[in-house]
Image: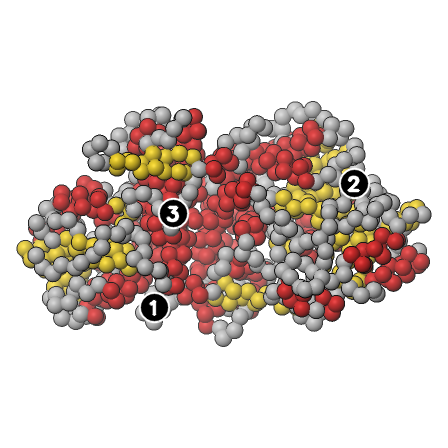
Amino acid sequence: VGRFYRYSAMNTTQDQGQMTSEEEELARVMQLSVGFVLPMVWKAAYELELFEIMAKASAQLTSREIASHLPTQNPEAPAMLERVLRFLASNSFLTCTLITDKDGNAKRLYGLAPICKLFFRDHNGASMAPFMLLLLDKVLVDSWFHLKDAIIEGGIPFNKAHGMHAFEYPAKDGRFNEIFNAAMHGQTILAMTKILETYKGFEGVKEVVDVGGGTGAALGRIVSRYPQIKGTNFDLPHVIRDAPPCPGVQHIEGDMFQNVPHGEVIFMKCVLHDWSDGHCLKFLKNCRNALPQSGKVVVVEYILPEYPETDLMSRNAAGCDMYMLTINPGGKERTEKEFEALARGAGFAAPVVVCRTFSGCVMELHKINIICSDMGMLTMNPGGKNKRIEKEFKALASRPGFAASKVICRPPLSLNHLAAAANLLAPASPPHREPPNRRLPLAPNHCAVAEVQLSAKTMHHGCQTYHKHAAGKPTFYTRLPSPAPVFISAMKPTEGQIEMTSEEEDLARFMQLPVGFVLPMVLKAAYELDVLEIMAKASAQLTSREIASHLPTQNPEAPAMLERVLRFLASNSFLTCTLITEEDGNSKRLYGLAPICKLFVRDHNGASMAPFMLLLHDKVFVDSWFHLKDAIIEGGIPFHKAHGMHAFDYPAKDGRFNEIFNAAMHSHSTLAMTKILETYKGFEGVKEVVDVGGGTGATLGLIISKYPQIKGINFDLSHVIRHAPPCPGVQHIEGDMFQDVPHGKVIFMKTVLHDWSDGQCLKLLKNCGKALAQSGKVVVVESILPEYPETDLLSRSVACFDMHMLTNPGGKERTLKEFEALARGAGFATPVVVCRTSAGCVMELYKM
């Protein structure tokens, strides 16, 4: 019947050979959608308590067995749940075993992967799940849709979404306040447990004030470990009123911008990143005023690398910076230099990086006017007293390997220790990736602190090895203990000198969930700002200020906001970055397009993947995800629950969304069909093609441009056809494919079947069968799901789109067996898989 093509019985979603670099880039672009979908599907699974149900079982479970534990009468719940579980398994959040029963039918058994332990409460009653639920709450998600406007107009995206400050909002919304406090409590307990295993700076301390301490979880952990400490938990009134009693902790409400309670040690965990530099300077000065002369401020924060590194921890820090940009009032993650500028501006010495954990770096801030010697405590004033001490420090600084030296320390300290430092910090040879000085054990907490800057001249090419894109003088912080000269080398605090444990790797991967959500939303803003097109037209790399000069904005903060967006995209390998140091010692970053960006820049046909990504991350579609859990329990389609109508009825009611939808389909079809027509030869000799669900005609236009003998009929709904431009050789016809389909020798459907349920597809395919000549064929382009949830890039992308189909139009991606069942049910023979492209598999259906 007709012409047959030979094909191997392969898993059609996997490569027949090695993917080309272009296919890999396209697959990675499609992973952007996975990055968004995975956290939203995880959220629904957690709210359904699927992980708890599976944890209580003594064996792996089927989706039907898991569904039996849910409070649902929805007959579709097991099938919907099967798709959710398969998607989570394809992303390694669940294990899966595929077995065949006695009837030859396959079924999947699911279990918990190791990473799932982070979803459960530990012996302290804490888990990371509440923190993840906070980041994915609709209140915060809605802020992302205002990022572009905030860059152009100024302001904070959260404020634009909700009309108030992010720290004012919880007082107005009881539900969100509970979620926020639960998130902070759980994350703080886990973080402080790890911090207290490493950081010993509370030993011998009698009083700690936790500024911005929430409901007291952090201070509770500190006091339980160091019961001699009297703790003061300080936060806003609406936070303190929900704080439970805690032995050894006094809760005090107030405003840190007015004053801070006095204490020997002031502690702040992830507080500075919530605020602008101006805000931080204000409350750091308040902290300084509240400290005794020998006191210290202990700060836990991420430290951004100067160069946007692509390792997991650096990407997490860059992702958190985007949350700060979008949600908090001028908040941001900072580099070492930025923390130093803050500290010095508030009257402290340069921060001392004491240790690093997955929760960030622990830094100590000491008042700048303390200096010690083995003869007693002296005070160095800006006016230049204690010339003998200064002279000896300057002499030390002139030794080989030092460009400058300032000492800020606590007793006791001998100047001989500083001399020993010069020997131990000699440049390493040969040069290597780590900072070019020796690594030595951590010093005890009572040690002195010296700030030492190694000169680029002495380091030679070692500097270039460590800072592969930088020129200049890297700063290292070195701790000098007493009495024995034991030192810690100053590591780059965002890069660990020890490998992460498996537990830390799991946690870092879990923290990538919100980063995965952030990446497509930041790219969306960058595309709406036309940033990628601006960069594509430039003949060289550009600074953020140069790019901002092309934007229609008077916002003075636009270059700084754009710098953070660009740095985040570079840390995720979507941009290139070169870090250079200017004559005045200041560094600047130059950004360019990475190879993957060519998919987001319009090609010679005026098409790119960007409009398709904009569609998937449009607020209309995003709002559907918040109804996935309810759809599984109650039945129905999440999109219906969000908008009160079917996804294909909605564009007729919303002109803005209709334009976005049509632009996405046009661009995606142009790119996909260009690839398909390079491989698929099934239109040779054909005289008539009907494109069912053909949108505005882009697909048929490309077919006819390659095969001009073809007469084309583009068939779609009326609100789509009225926007279809004239196209030579193409007739546009409006109608409903579930009623009838225009007659033709070849009926073509690209990614139409996946939009609909099995029942609707059978109806559509039967209509195609009626409209088809006996010797005709239906040509279908669809992705094919593997029977087993594979974890390769392409399979994860297909599983991801299955979640999109479940949540928006109510359709689904299918396995080869499911396509065979559809074809036979509609009166066709088994589908013939002709070829595979990056756009999907091309199948031909012939009448039996």
Which residue matches tag 3? 791
Q: How is the image coloured?
A: secondary structure
Answer with mark 2 or mark 3, whichever residue precedes in sequence. 2
Q: Quadrant of residue 588?
A: bottom right
CA gap between label 1 and label 2 equals: 61 Å
In the image, residue 785 lies at what x, y percent?
29, 47
Which residue matches tag 1? 606
Disc 1 vs disc 2: Cβ atoms closer than 8 Å?
A: no
The amino acid type found where label 2 is placed reads Ala
Tell me what residue is drawn at x 20 percent, y 54 percent.
Answer: 833
CA gap between label 2 and label 3 equals: 54 Å
Could you say whether the residue bearing mark 3 is in a helix, strand or loop? loop
Tell me what residue is drawn at x 65 percent, y 41 percent.
Answer: 269
Which residue matches tag 2? 290
Could you say whether the residue bearing mark 2 is in a helix, strand or loop? helix
Left or right, 121 with respect to 812, comes to right
Answer with mark 3 or mark 1, whichever residue precedes in sequence. 1
Disc 3 vs disc 1: Cβ atoms closer than 8 Å?
A: no
In the image, residue 432 lies at what x, y percent?
64, 61
